[in-house]
Image: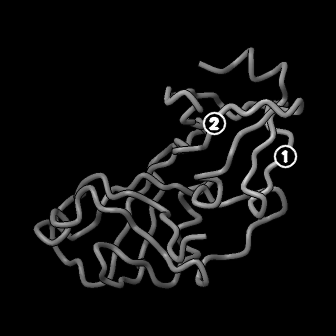
């Protein structure tokens, strides 16, 4: 498991006082308030303020970023936290970083590939690299994923549902 978790990506500066717009990789943008210390570009910051902006976006103010010029230097960078600083998750909830690299199999044992990325959305989109080197995607719709075992590095899906939704 990785020592750092990505919790957001900085999209752009907002206004003239150093605020930045972020795409949160948490269930709710307000969850960003739970982190005392974050890292951007290798530097530590404190999140001073979070304003949700609809969907998975929010405007945040970081300590030490006082104007638009400073905020502009952060454009496109990821906001990360130390795993040990991350709050405990509710049951059946996982950090994306822990699912990346897991093998996806169906309940009949067929291997579909390895999770390369997950696009956070209302219904997360899983992207796999198949055994033959192609890319496969599927939304994490209800009834599709029956088990996630981050220790065994395996995601189990319903054989019948995967055929309905996979691209």
Q: Quadrant of the N terminus?
A: bottom right
Question: Is residue 139 or residue 52 the one in the foreground?
Answer: 139
Query: What is the image's colouring?
Result: one colour
Lower position in the chain sequence, tag 1 or tag 2: 2
Horizontal side of residue 137 vs 161, given as left or right: left
**Which residue lies at the image location 25% right of the left edge and 54% below the top edge?**
12
**Which residue lies at the image location 74% right of the left edge and 68% below the top edge?**
89
Indicate the position of residue 80 as horizontal and vertical percent values.
44, 71
Question: Is residue 59 or residue 115 the one in the foreground?
Answer: 115
Question: Badge 1 is on which residue?
Answer: 147
| Label 1 packing within 10 angstroms: few (<14), some (14-19), many (20+) | some
Q: Which residue is farthest top? A: 164
Confirm or deny contact between disc 1 and disc 2 (CB under 8 A).
no
Instruction: Find numbered disc 1 in the image and state the secondary structure of the residue it sits on.
Output: strand
Q: Quadrant of residue 8?
A: bottom left
Whether residue 39 is situated above or below residue 90 in the rendered picture: below
Q: Quadrant of the C terminus?
A: top right
**Which residue lies at the image location 52% right of the left edge and 80% below the top edge?**
82
Q: Which residue is farthest front? A: 132
Which of pointers 1 and 2 indicates the residue nearer the eye? 2
Horizontal side of residue 17 vs 56, given as left or right: left
| Label 2 packing within 10 angstroms: few (<14), some (14-19), many (20+) | many
Question: Badge 2 is on which residue?
Answer: 113
Indicate the position of residue 160 as horizontal and vertical percent values.
84, 19
Total number of numbered discs in the rendering: 2
């Amino acid at each position: 498991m990785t020592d750092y978790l990505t919790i957001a990506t900085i999209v752009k500066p907002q206004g003239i006082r150093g605020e930045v717009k972020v795409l949160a990789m948490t269930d709710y943008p307000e969850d960003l308030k739970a982190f005392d210390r974050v890292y951007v570009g290798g530097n530590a910051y404190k999140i001073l303020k979070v304003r949700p902006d609809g969907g998975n976006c929010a405007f945040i103010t970081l300590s030490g970023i006082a104007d638009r010029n400073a905020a502009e230097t952060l454009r496109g960078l990821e906001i990360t936290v130390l795993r040990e600083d991350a709050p405990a998750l509710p049951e059946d909830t996982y950090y994306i970083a822990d699912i990346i690299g897991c093998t996806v199999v169906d309940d009949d044992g067929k291997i579909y590939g390895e999770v390369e990325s997950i696009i956070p959305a209302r219904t997360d989109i899983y992207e796999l690299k198949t055994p033959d080197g192609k890319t496969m995607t599927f939304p994490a719709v209800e009834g599709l994923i029956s088990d996630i075992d981050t220790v065994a590095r395996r995601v189990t899906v319903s054989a019948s549902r995967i055929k309905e939704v996979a691209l």
